[in-house]
Image: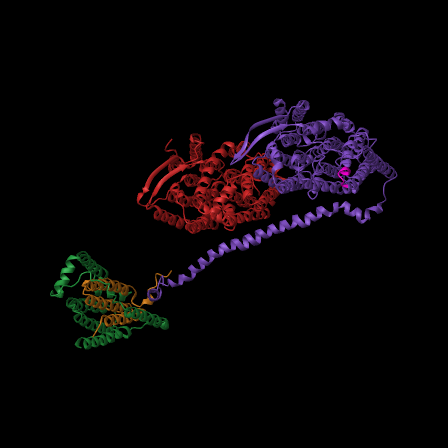
Chain colours: A purple, B red, C orange, D green
Amino acid sequence: MEKYLFVALFAPLVGSLFSLLFTAQKKNVITALVTSALLLLSFVSSLSLMYAVFNGMIIHVKMMDWISAGNLNVPFGFMVDNVSVVMMVTVTLVSSIVNIYSMGYMMHDKGYNRFFTYISAFVFSMLILVMSDNFVGLFIGWEGVGLCSYLLIGFWYEKDTATWAGNEAFIMNRVADLGMLLGLFLIYWQFGSFEYDVVFAQVGGINPAVVTTIGLLLFIGAMGKSAQFPFHTWLADAMEGPTPVSALIHAATMVTAGVYLIIRASALFSLVPEVGHIIAALGAFVAVFAASMALVNRDLKKIIAYSTLSQLGYMFVAAGLGAYWIALFHLMTHAFFKSLLFLGAGNIMHAMDDELDIKKMGGLFNAMPYTAILMAVASVALCGIYPFAGYFSKDLILAAAFNGGNYYIWIALFIGAGMTAFYSFRLIMMVFFGDKVYKKLGFHPHETYPFVLWTLLPLGVLSTIAGFFEHPFEEFTTKLLGKYDFGMSHATEVGLQFLTLAFVILVVLGTIYKYGRGGFSKQIETMPLYILLKNQYFIPKIYEVMIFKPYYVLSRFAWKQIDVRIIDFTVDLIAKILYLLGQRSRKMQSGNLSDMLRWMVVGIVVLLALAIFYRPGM
Amino acid sequence: MEHILSLIVFFPLIAGLFGLVINKENIKTFGITMALIEFIFSIILWIGFDSTNAGYQFVQYAALIPQFGVSYYLGVDGISLFLVILSTLMTLISLIGLNIKKDIKNLVITILFLEMTLVGVFLSLDMILFYIFWELSLIPMLYIIGAWGSGQRIYAAIKFFLYTFAGSALMLVGILYLGYQYYLATGTWSFSVPDWYLLVLPFKTQLWLFGAFFLAFAVKVPMFPFHTWLPYAHGQAPTIGSVLLAAVMLKMGTYAFIRFSLPLFPDASVYFLYPIAIIATIMVIYAAMVAYAQKDMKQVIAYSSISHMGIIILGIFAMNAEGLTGSIFLMLSHGIVSGALFMLVGVIYDRRHTKLMSEFGGLATVMPRYAAIFGVLMMAAVGLPLTIGFVGEFLSLLGFYRVSWVITMFAGSGIILGAVYMLTMFRKSFFGKVIKEENKNLKDLDKREFAALIPLVALVVILGVYPKPILTTIDLSVKKMINLMEKKALLPDTKEFLVKVNSIGGTK
Amino acid sequence: MITLTHYLVLSGILFSIGIVGVLRRKNLLMLFFSTEILLNAVNIGFAAVSKYYGDLSGQIFSFFIIAIAASEVAVGLGLLVLWYKRSGTIDLDSLQMMKG
Amino acid sequence: MFEAIAFYMFSILVIGMFLIVVFSKNALYSMSALAGGMIFISGFFFLLDADFLGVVQIIVYTGAIMAVYAFGMMFFDTTRDVKENIRFKKIIYTLSTLSAIFVIFILLAPVYSGKIEALYPSIQGVGNIQMIGLILFTKYLVPFELAAIMLLAAMISGIVLVKIKMEETPTDIEVAKGEK
């Protein structure tokens, strides 16, 4: 089976390198075709690996040593087990679809070849992240996806906002990565190894305080990559990138890496429930916090981005509460419907000449019915309405929160679910129904290429049916992850399910009703709460004023004042003093013998004085 | 084979002397050929090097002044081997990338002389010999900056020379005093480093001597606050000067820390560990901040060098195999990466005669290949995994984490701040629209520049993916040195510290 | 009883007089005279020490000093005459070519 | 007693003479006083049983050196008072006084430590001149020869420096100067 592993892992790399050769040339469809084929190959290999794992195999390969120094030995080791294979399948599936989709989306872009290079490179990094059998390997992938994210956000590098967002994403991730790096260091000095097997085998015997520290540090890393508060601002700005990128990286795969990390290190996190609690609490907070910002936003992609954030919060709640398989399950279903949502948004953007303001749309259903249907499916799945995928996974998370006795988390998630329903259908209603504002603005929307729509179909199907795989999925993953035991009675469970479902459906209906009749009045936009939400709680502003600007000012100060005025000045001062001394003492050399004689006598007097008064050792 | 070290040291000198009779048109080809031969010699050295032997190999010994124990003593071990190869490689590369017409004959000969001194510094096992090469290396660089520089070149050259020279003056006193101590202890004179390794000095003496050596090395590295010569030197130096200065000359300081400070004065090194670590941390953060504020691309890279050197210092003073091996590897990677970055800045300087970021913008559109190579090297500079920059930085910080996690945390912020200034610079110069008219018709990289840069890019990736052969060779010698330190340590605290940082487990 | 100290003090006094002369005089010739005084003062000291220690080395030194004084005068006066011929004065203030 | 009277007398004379040398404005007076002082110093040498030195002092100093000075002075205009621009008088006198005090302080300090041993003790019963001869031509032979060479060199250089081009007479030069 190792063959499949290598094929799955390296096919995207080959694709990336292949299209790299064409980057400097004109648009060439071959790059897209080759990379798509290779990604599909990778997907097929992943599937066969999944089949193998399903039959109880775990494939563990050590390719070669990477770093070795002192006691440290980090190999390139890859492991396909129940958890990683799920991720592999998800990643390769979504990326294949996105890649094919992009053939349509990027059709007229200058950077056509470059785009596919980056996407394949991203998939390769993501697979390394997922498949690595040690923390450093994971970190390689971690940084690799960060790099690809940076490149793809700033893909249209002539746009200042895009490059700025790329920098922001990379740097913010770096901040969190430092936390993760420190966690890795601590792991190494505790266990002497980075390999999951070694570390998790010994983790029980370690001082709990240290485990807590490790857990927190790793979680900081996860927060950065998964854009949890306070690192969340980069994700919304990352929407500057091409939409397929948003679908692949900033919804389905990369941002879930943080969740994956927690799941991967579940053996470690399950030992320290306090850390888990912190994770869950933060997740719940973000679930509501991000959803609230999505309520009022008018930017099509940003709404979906905030929704992603919110859903990531849900996943963290599950992971934090020890329901690892549920988190993974939600991660998977979310990948399907969220990428679908984004790709649908891509279609709209395409139709609307890259216009993003949903106020300028409306009534697009007639122009692009298939997209509308697909997006509606995705939205329903997102809201968690039976029988769509989101219903099953999200419901499980709510149940887990209730079950853990953390009612405040449950309440938060419950409210979050309502908000999700609201903003999803607000988007649907404002974009596809109501007045045809776009006509006044002179847009001529049209449905996209048929092959693009066909590629979206698998996602649509999966969004619909994935939920029914709940039990096989549980069985499959809990072989590795540990079961999550719902202690509550069946009646409570059903009651909760019903309650949530009813609430969500109510909100959905209310939203449809309200926006069907023209939506809210303008007055609402002057409410303080609206302004607060509209400005994303002023957090970007605060970062700008409190961090970016002071840092620049401080840097200028360090250079202009400290470096030039103090340090270099001191150095030059020493030189100047010496020079001045020379200048002054030059006068001694008047050339006049009399003066010289006088100096000579001064010397004699000094020497005599020394001879008389200086008594060493006395 | 047994004379290969002498050959490596003196071949550039002989080649340089021959260069005097070569005419102007052929001198560059001649220089490249000679540098290539020298590089091949160093590769042969690597091939012949027994990587299972931690000690000195290919040792050459001849007494020069037997009465005072001064000798011609060369040897190579895992620590110095790759620095020698780095020197020869970077000389070759910089000569390939050379694009100066003025007085090219003198320049090539100077570069060859410089190569001799650099290699000599890394191969000397006799302290006096080392000192001679150490000081000799200043002269070619002084000449390069002063004669081929731009702007305030005389000021920069003299500042560079006097600053580093003043630092080493104290080292000479230290060397002589240490020689005298050796004489007192054994009754014979010797300046050979392996002999000195066996000398156990009293704690007080160690402190003083450590201080004397420290100043010389700190100026060379350059450590905060002795760094201000560096921006001037880089700012005015021609590309080739900057490349060699950043890639190899700075490494002399950190190499000397490893070769001399640690094994000669283990107790003092441990005693001064925290102050130095704090200085190094300040260096990392401060230089990164100053780099961010720069307007000139070359200055950004110059300050980034200081920042990276801080991490190297931390790795050295981690005093465990992980940190030390990492710091030596980081020296190599920084040599390659910063050298390449300086060359890249030189490329754009040749075309536009300015290095100010505000003059550029949108270069990625006009010069895509240039932007791509710059991007790869930038990523190596910010320490992205699977590039050469990551391995050393990771290991250095990993090593120092064992000593102090707080300092590591602050120093680790270098990887954040590094990304900040690098990405900002990249964005300002390469991204955005092409606004300036002059930039619209810039040529992309030509063959000569490719020939110089592609090997470096290849190395960046290859050594990033497979650093192991280098790491294991370094590691062996480093472990031997740590053993020596442990054996020599006088104070129980030192011993305990060394054992602690070199073992796994326990509380943090 | 005249002791060594007497002689030495005398030698010291004479030496000081010589120093005053060296410092004070601007006329080169006078300066030469003053140096003669210095040399002679030292000579007395040597001779006295020689006597009181019963060692003739002191006298020998005096002897050499006299020889040196003689050569100094020969060369010095030669230079002086040359300079006078060239500049018409032997005042020290006219000799400032070594100004740094 | 006789020795004391002689010592003090000579001391006063020598100091007086030398003071005149230092302070006189007339070069001629100075030179005469110097010559006098030299002769009186030889008195000390005789007092100190250094007969040979005393004789040499008179012959060389008074006979040779002063004669050279006298000849030298013929080149200069010595009848006029020497005009000197003496500045920094205070400094001069402070320095002189200080050095005088220090020198005398040192010389007054007890030097009779008894540890000093004569390197070449004078042998009783042998005359001073013989002794000098013995030492000079044995222990100090090389310095002596060197001194001879030095004197020769000084003589030659003195001649070369002062020499007037042989083909010209002094009057020619004077005439030439006058024409300018």
In the image, C2 versus D171, the foreground residue is C2
In this rendering, the answer to whether B456 lies above or below A533 is: above
**Residue A150, quarter of the rendered image:** top right
Where is residue B225? Give x, y as percent. Answer: 51, 51
In the image, B425 versus A146, the foreground residue is A146
The reply to whether residue B197 is visible in this rendering is yes
Quadrant location of the C terminus of chain B in the rendered image: top right
Classify residue B122 as left or right of residue A265. Answer: left
Residue B160 magenta-highlighted: no
The reply to whether residue B453 is visible in this rendering is no
Q: Bounds of the magenta span?
A: A401-406
Where is residue A225? Give x, y as percent. Answer: 67, 38
Where is residue B277? Give x, y as percent. Answer: 53, 47
**Residue A455, quarter of the rendered image:** top right
Residue found 59% across the figure and 40% down from its top: A186
Quadrant location of the N terminus of chain B in the rendered image: top left
Residue A402 magenta-highlighted: yes
In this rendering, the answer to whether A589 lies above or below B209 is: below
Classify residue A338 as left or right of residue B53. Answer: right
In the image, B493 versus A557, the foreground residue is B493
**What is the tally of numbered marks visible in this picture?**
0
**Residue D117, quarter of the rendered image:** bottom left
Where is residue B90? Give x, y as percent. Answer: 48, 37
In this rendering, the answer to whether B211 lies above or below C98 is: above
Classify residue A317 as left or right of residue A62. Answer: right
